């Protein structure tokens, strides 16, 4: 659930940032938004990988 919220928030931020750039142009703030969203996507990947590893360890201990 947390991973889904993280991914959807990043997608919304990037979409708003694209609209902002098309209307007002790019500046340092929009670059920071892109960097922040990229880091959030990396965090999503790390969280997903951690969940898969955790599930594997739990279910291999049960068997």
Image: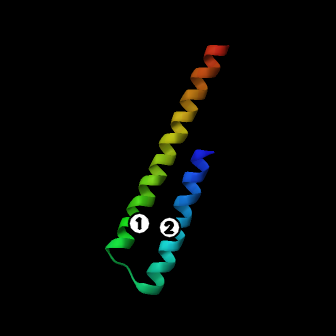
Picture quarter with the N terminus? top right
Q: Secondary structure at mark 2?
A: helix
Between discs 1 and 2, the one toward the N terminus: 2
Q: Which mark is residue 51?
A: none
Q: Quadrant of residue 37?
A: bottom left
**Residue 6, position as x, y percentages in the image:** 54, 52
Q: Secondary structure at mark 1?
A: helix
**Quick one: label 1, few (<14), some, or many (20+) residues within 10 Å?**
some
Front-most of 22 and 29?
29
Is 30 on the left-hand or right-hand side of 2? Answer: left
Q: Residue at horizontal 51%, vertical 34%?
A: 50
Q: For mark 1, what is the residue?
A: 33
| Cα separation between marks 1 and 2 | 7 Å
**Residue 27, position as x, y percentages in the image:** 34, 77
Q: Residue at horizontal 44%, vertical 80%?
A: 21
Is 1 on the left-hand or right-hand side of 42? Answer: right
Q: For mark 2, what is the residue?
A: 14
Does 25 appear above or below 2? below
**Quick one: label 2, few (<14), some, or many (20+) residues within 10 Å?**
some
**Residue 30, position as x, y percentages in the image:** 39, 72
Q: Quick check: marks 1 and 2 in contact, CB under 8 Å?
A: yes
């Amino acid at each position: 659930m947390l991973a889904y919220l993280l991914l959807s928030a990043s997608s919304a931020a990037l979409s708003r940032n694209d609209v902002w750039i098309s209307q007002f142009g790019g500046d340092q703030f929009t670059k920071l938004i892109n960097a922040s969203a990229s880091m959030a996507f990396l965090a999503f990947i790390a969280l997903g990988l951690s969940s898969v590893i955790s599930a594997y360890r739990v279910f291999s201990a049960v068997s």
